Structure formats: structure tokens, C-alpha cells
Amino acid sequence: MKSSIGIIGGGFSGCMLAYHLLENTKDLQVVIFNKSSRIGPGLAYEPQSSTMLLNVKAGKMSAFPAIPTDFVDWLTKENIFPLNTREEITDSFVSRELYGYYLDQIWQNILQIHGARITEVINEVITISNRIDSFTIETKTKVYTVQYCVLATGNEKPRNPFLSDKAFISSQNYHQNPWAIPTEKIHDTKPILIIGTGLTMVDTIHYLREKNKNGIIYCISPHGFKILAHENSIVSYDDILEKIQLSGHLADLLAQFNSAKKEIQKRKGSLDALINFFRPITGIIWQGFTPYEKNFFLEHLRHKWGVARHRLPPISFQKINKEIQDKKLNINAGKIKEIIENESGLNVRYFDNAKNKELSLTVSCVINCTGPEGDVSKMKNGLLLNLLKKGLIESGPSNLGVQVSVNDMQIKNTHNIKKLYAIGNLLRGELWESTAVNELRSQTEKVAQEIIRTEKTKNNC
């Protein structure tokens, strides 16, 4: 009997996993489930605005680990930037929408070559159940039977603010999902509050301005705005980086990181080289931490790593700074205490760290940009909550994602059920960095290899 695999999620991970499986097998059937009819781009690369840029240069955005120039090759072949040299394209920050078209074309090519082995299900998965040698995947209208199942569900909505009065959460002026903002419901000139000051905040501000939302924008987060811009540097710091010893202990690694940082700063250099040194091995380092070290990192160092790790394209950085200089953007480090809706709008009471006192402001709406929820027990995804209740998944380390075996990406569960895998955001507890293309493309290839190996073993028995 021909085996089949159910892939839950049709974003980057689902698309590329299907590619690797179909390209390297002859008979495997792929059933891919997605709420949207567009497979490939997913939420990240089907943005609300064509002006939203990738935060990584085009030269590092290939979907294929073995073909690092593939995205640039595509841009060049499509003649999208006819006035730019290949070197300039490689070094540029292109739009996320454009990257979505790249993934869309990959999927269309997959369909053209392997369409007979693909079933696209444009529907929400309600639950998954296991049998002796298979899984049943249930949507609102139909039940599918597969031998393998992969959760590639992507990012969840941010967690709602933890406040005593939760009435405002049901307000039409509160927007929990920053990736689907109904701007037609937002006043053009009245103030807006954004909770969170990370990369999503930057995208949201650009989008609001594009939609002529010209009121002052307030932003509040525990640390305020600390994001830096990418810097162009051709200087090598190998003599500094080669001194770093990866002992595995958090305190020692932090000391070495800070020492290298100071040495690079003395030379007035960019920290990109230091971050690039750690990025490929972040998952390995994270796995070596004790539970205490992981929790300490999340509580005390998470923000600092985020500042170093997440950089903006220079043009985006300049736009945000101009907003601040023109006093159209007011960023505060502090903690929100209360949000009450009244006739004037949403009254926000918060503690301001810089002024060391409570302040208040009134805004027309609140947008949540605090980042995707990582704790599966707190997610609003009905499928994941259902699987958690059944014991098919368990909360991951530090209550991030789910528990998996990082050797083969199989989900650990109380029933010891095999052939159930996870990719992407659900691996954050095990790998920490598990949302960028750099990690996702490697994960999809690894899961595909494991499934292919299992199939070969079965067929040889």
C-alpha cells in the first residue's frame, strides 16, 4: 500500500517539506491542510503591505540549504531589479511580498511535476487521532487517513495582556492579531497604542502610515525600543571569534560574548559578525543548558539577545527614527496596569520606568505586537489544545512549544506514538531559535530525510 503524509500548515515549512518528500520519493502521497488556498507564503510572506521588508538580505534567503543562491537566482531570472547588479541584489533587503511570490512559484512547480500525488485541503483541521499504523485527520467536512503526520502550524496570535479587568479584550478597538489589522475600523487622526516594541511593531507602524493613519502612535514594552539596524561591514574579526570556547554553561558563554563584543566595539566594528558566529549553533547551545539556565535566559537575557539578534533594514530603521524625531511616535519603557474603554476611547494606565511613576493616556485603539504565543496550553489553536488534552503533544521545555526528539523531530507524548512530527515555532522550547528561514529550511529537510529513511526501512522488511 502507498503511504501518505498529512502536513498541517501550508506556509514555508509545509511547502518545503512537501517539496523534499515529493522530490525524493516515487509513491508517497502528500495531503497538505491549510486555511488559505495559497500554499507557500503563509502568514509571514503574505503581508498586509508590499512595503514590508525582509529583515535578512536576499543572499541569505534561499529556500534550499543545498542551493544558497536560489532566491537571488530567481530574482535575477525574473528580471525584477533590471537596474541592479547581481551583487547589489544579493546585498539588498527585498519585500516580504516578493519572497512570497518566490515561494508561490516553488509550490506551482511542485504541483506541475507531482500534482498527481498531492491533495490540497483548504480547511481547518479540528483534531487528529491515532490508530495502530495510521492517523485520522478530521476537518469540519471530512476525515483523512495518513501514515505520517507533521504539525507545521506556524505562529500563533500574541498573548492578551494580563490585566485584572479583561473587558477591553472583547472591544472592537482592540486588535490581538497584528498581521490582520482591519485599518478601516481605525480612526485616521486619533492616537493609537501598540503593545510591544519589536520587529512586528516596526512593520505595523509602516502599515498604519501607508493606510493614512496619521495620529500619534504610542508604544509600551518592558524595555522600550532597542532594535538596531543591520550594518555593512567587510572587516573580519576572526582573531576575536576564534577565542570563544563553547563550554555550554550560560554564565561562561555570556562572559565570552560580552568580552568579544567589547573587543569588536573598541575597533568601532559591527556586531553582526558576532551574531553570525552564534546563529548556526544557537540550537545546540540551547540544548546544553540546564532547565535553570533556560529559565534564567528567558527572564533576564532574552531581550538583550533579541536586540543583538533582530536587526532592521537601514531604510526601516531610518523611518522609525524619523517618526520619533517628528514626535509622531512616542516609545515608552514600562508596564501597562489597566486598560478601560469609555466614551473617550481606551484609557490606558501604565507605569513609566523613566519617570518612575504611573501615567495615563487615551487612545482610539490598541494593537498587540508582543510576539507569537509560545505556550501551547495558552494558545487559541483548537487543534493544538485538542492534541494536548489527548496527550498526543506535551508542553515543551520552559513551556515553549512541544516536546520533541531533536534527533528526528518526532513528537514525544505519553502514548509513545511514532511518525508524528513538528516543525517551526513548536520547536522553540527544544531549539529556541526556530522561526527564521535559516532554521525552517534545515528542519524541513531533516524531517523529510527521517520519513524517507523510515519508508525505506519498512519496504525492506
Image (cartoon, rainbow, N blue to C red):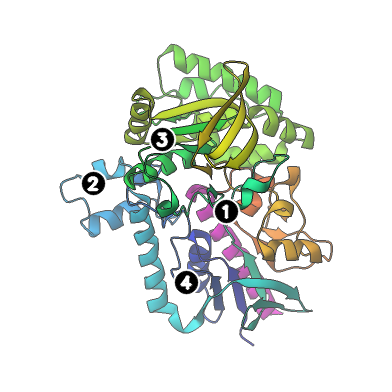
Q: Identify the residue position indicated by label 4 in the image.
A: 23
N-terminal of the pair, mark 4 or mark 3, is 4
Provide residue 32's location: percent of width, then percent of height: 54, 73
Q: Identify the residue position indicated by label 2 in the image.
A: 86
Residue 9 higher or lower than 59, as above or below: below
Q: Is residue 197 visible?
A: no
**In the image: residue 23, left or right of residue 359:** left
Q: CA distance from mark 3 to mark 1?
A: 20 Å
The mark lying in front, picked from 4 and 3, is 3
**In the image: residue 201, left or right of residue 112:** right
Provide residue 60's location: percent of width, then percent of height: 40, 45
Task: Locate residue 282: give its quadrant.
Answer: top right
| Element type at mark 3 | strand
Q: Amino acid at mark 2?
A: Arg
N-terminal of the pair, mark 3 or mark 1, is 1
Give the residue at the far bottom of this rendering: 1
- Front residue of 143 and 218: 218
Image marks 3 and 1: residues in contact by CB distance under 8 Å: no
> Measuring 51% from the left and 24% from the top, which residue is drawn there?
241
> Measuring 41% from the left and 23% from the top, which residue is drawn there?
270
Image marks 1 and 4: residues in contact by CB distance under 8 Å: no
- Front residue of 402 and 162: 162
